[in-house]
Image (spheres, helix red, strand yellow):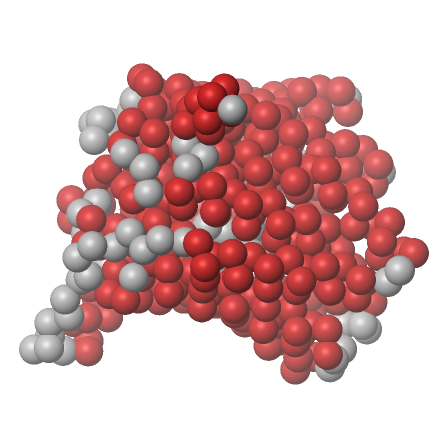
Amino acid sequence: MTTLRSLARHLALEGNIRVLALQTLISQLGFGMFYVIWQPYVLSTGVSVVGLGIIQSIINLSTAVGLIFWGILSDQLGRKRVILVSNACRVIALIALMVSTNFAFLLVFAFFIGFSSLFMQANPARSALTSESVDSNRRATAFSTLLFFSQITNTLVASAGGYLAVTLGYHSIFYICVAGDLVGLLLLGIFLKETLKDPAKEDAAQSTASKLVDYLVPERSLAKLYLIMTVMGLGYGTTYSVFYGTLVDTYRFDPIQLGILSTSFNLTWGVTSIPLGRLSDRIGRLPLLKASWAAAFIAILGFLASRSFEMFLLFNMISALDTSFWLSAWMAYVAEKASSERLSTVMGKLESYVRWVGIPAPWLGGLLYSSYGFAAPLVVQAICLTASGALIFSLKEA
């Protein structure tokens, strides 16, 4: 028992983090499968690829809006309320998907799944609550522990999603998702503790226009962080939104090979997230952010040089290390740079900049590929990494 308690403390699995980890495990049992099958399901309803693109664009737009909306609301009303309501939005999205194949209901799904900011995305209220639930020397560990539960669960259930869709139909997965989210909502409602101590005060004299500017324009002291996210959003979005498609078109990779690439990425990310989170808490945030940049550049150079599946597999795992080095260290760094009364707002705004820039990125990646070949989107990422690297290496430890 003592050993288990010690392990839980080392992993920051106490209090709110334990509740969030359990809720993540339960909800991802369904969503780990949902991520795999939602696009094939939409196409099976008779929607064209163009229609699917419209749905994806709505998801991107509503996610960007949701990130800002939930971030502001979380700083004013509290983290727990926003987490519960945003999770409820995800349930509404799934119900819309289940009750009808009409395109209007698919658009309702797209809006609410994006607006929840919980679809392949960290909700700013959840991120703020995570950072406030532990002391600073365990902050990155807490983020990485939650990422571990999410990624490992996704890896384990992804293959089951395809099997269930074929044998029992897509709706069986939707039912699992809704049940998991409802159980998760119950857990969060009962056991999650509020962490916001000083709600942000609205200035009644401030005009609507000036409030809107304040909500959208970067804080001057954090301008460099917004610039990093903008550059990275363009580079990663242009390259990786079309990456698997270009591998199929150029190198004739089959679905099994793509599945291996996806599984190896998720597994590498999941297994390394906790050790790297703990390392960030020991040696600081910037060494891991710089290591992430180095891994990203090595991965891009490796993809440019690769000619076999085995080489792509290797550098795809290095790309996963890029993500694993980055996420927990970045979230902890932002939490330590932003003021506590605007923490959730800042987290939401930073992530929204990635989404805004990411809206045209897939189109740009496809255009570059069709015009100049496989290397063109990767070169854009290399250029963006050069720019973001200059910014990252100029940062000061919080």
Please, is residue 238 above or below residue 188 in the view? above
Please, is residue 46 above or below residue 148 in the view? below
Q: Name the image quarter holding the C terminus.
A: top left
Relative placement, left or right, of 268 versus 4 is right
Q: Is residue 364 visible?
A: no
The image shows a total of numbered marks equal to: 0
Query: Which is nearer the eye, 361 or 6?
Result: 6
Query: Which is nearer the eye, 26 or 211?
Result: 26
- Percent x, y for residue 282? 33, 18
Query: Which is nearer the eye, 184 or 141?
Result: 184
Residue at position x 45%, y 35% in the image: 13
- Percent x, y for residue 241? 60, 47
Query: Which is nearer the eye, 132 or 96?
Result: 132
Residue farthest toward the left in the current orientation of the protein: 205
Residue farthest toward the right in the current orientation of the protein: 167
In the figure, residue 383 lies in which quadrant? top left
